[in-house]
Amino acid sequence: SSHSRSLRPSMFDIAKIRADFPLLNETVNEQPLVYLDSAATSQKPQAVIDALARFYSHENANVHRGRHTLSENATRQYEHTRTLLADYFSVKANELVWTKGATESINLIANGLASRLKPGDKIAISAIEHHANIVPWQQLAKRTGADLIILPIEDDLVIDSVKCCEFIKLYQPKIVAVTHASNTLGNITDLAPIITACKAINAISVIDGAQAAMHLRPNLQEISCDFYVFSAHKMLGPTGLGGLYGRFELLNSLDVYQTGGEMIETVSLTQSTFRDAPGKFEAGTPNIAGVIAFSEAIKYLTSLDFQQMRQHEHTVFDYAIKQLSAIDGINIYSNQIHNIGNISFNYRDEHPFDLATLLDGFGVAVRSGHHCTQPIMSHLHIPGTVRASFALYNNKDDVDAFIDALKNSIELLD
Ligand code: PMP
């Protein structure tokens, strides 16, 4: 009942959360830091930082090799993190492969699918993809003689699910690779109709979850895509770590990407056999400390009530949009409703680098440039944008400080 709900203490205590992220207390250029660049990489809670130090101080050993205590302990923790992430995404642990990030994950998938493509086959991507979800497919097309085709977008740079479905039905691509949320704009893609259209023609769906994996806590079983890639460092985890989900049968049938130790079953001097997924895609010594510390990030995220977290993110985002819109000369490119929390904008025709540099002088960390999405910039006929990106640990005070700094910066420009 609403009565018992109102008695429940709020699980989303923003002051407490902010205290868990030591970097938020730093000063930059003698100003308190306002970190609005979480789309590039998220900050890390103390538990993740401590886990890295603990592993290297007390537990460091290689995985899957030794029979000694430390090695077995490291292996157990490494595999346990895979189980935690499987729960997070509602999939099975053997459907998750560790990589060094979303970029490597997409390259792994593209390479693994090469032998299935023939000249004239089509690979579909959208026009709002990150370069990491464009270039590997261009290379794959070159290598196989396949053609890259571009899915339709709406004028406001949201992937048009309805038109996409017609497009997929018409052109029958073998692979459809789209983002779950745009890094530049924050715009969220309505995946369900696209996945349904892919299934209808047996196209392989590859979803770039680098931006959405933390904000939307996706249930991949429900989304039911074939592949979903992510970066741990954008989910409160360490840098140099990411991974991919692949529907087991399909994943296990991919050609291997990198080869060597760890991924094999047997090796003779002339031939080798490989392990089943995920092992066969994890050649060499992985980022053991990173994976183990990432378990603390997953536990941190799942300790937060998802609805409350999203509600908080929406509140801060809406507030930022309202404040920004009130400034004369600000042009916002992001969708203002279906958004994970990334706002791309410009001030009149000032260069985004200049604005970002001035903001930095006020302690405000935003990103400027093309954000690895040059096709979006061409579409908008601009060299770049300023991007303020928010995460669960940002609050309205951050927005106020950002808007103050922005007004001061604009005064310096004018
Ligand atoms: N896709 C998207 C949408 C991204 O935002 C990023 C990171 N900027 C990537 C892919 C690549 O991720 P990483 O650099 O961690 O490999």
Image (cartoon, grey):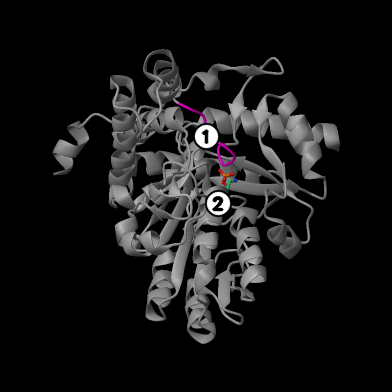
Residue 256, percent from left and from top: 47, 56
Q: Is residue 40 magenta?
A: yes
Which amino acid type is marked by label 1?
A: Ser
Spatial separation of the CA atoms under disc 1 and disc 2: 15 Å
Nearest to the observer: residue 68 or residue 288: 68
Helix, strand, or loop for circle 2? loop
Element assignment for label 1: loop
Residue drawn 56% across and 29% down? 398
| Viewer-closest of 395 and 322 | 395
In the image, 387: left or right of 3? right
Establish if 266 lies above or below 241: below
Looking at the image, residue 26 lies above or below residue 118? above
What kind of secondary structure does the magenta stretch mostly adopt?
loop
Which mark, by number, is residue 42? 1
Disc 1 crowd rating (10 Å Cα; few below 14, some 14-19, many 20+) is: many
Three-letter residue code for mark 2 = Gly
Q: Quadrant of the C terminus?
A: top right
Side (left or right) of 393 relative to 64: right
Q: Residue furthest front?
A: 269
Residue 170 placement, left or right of 289 = right
Residue 118, position in %: x, y? 57, 78
* Direction from residue 202 to residue 320 in the image, left or right: right
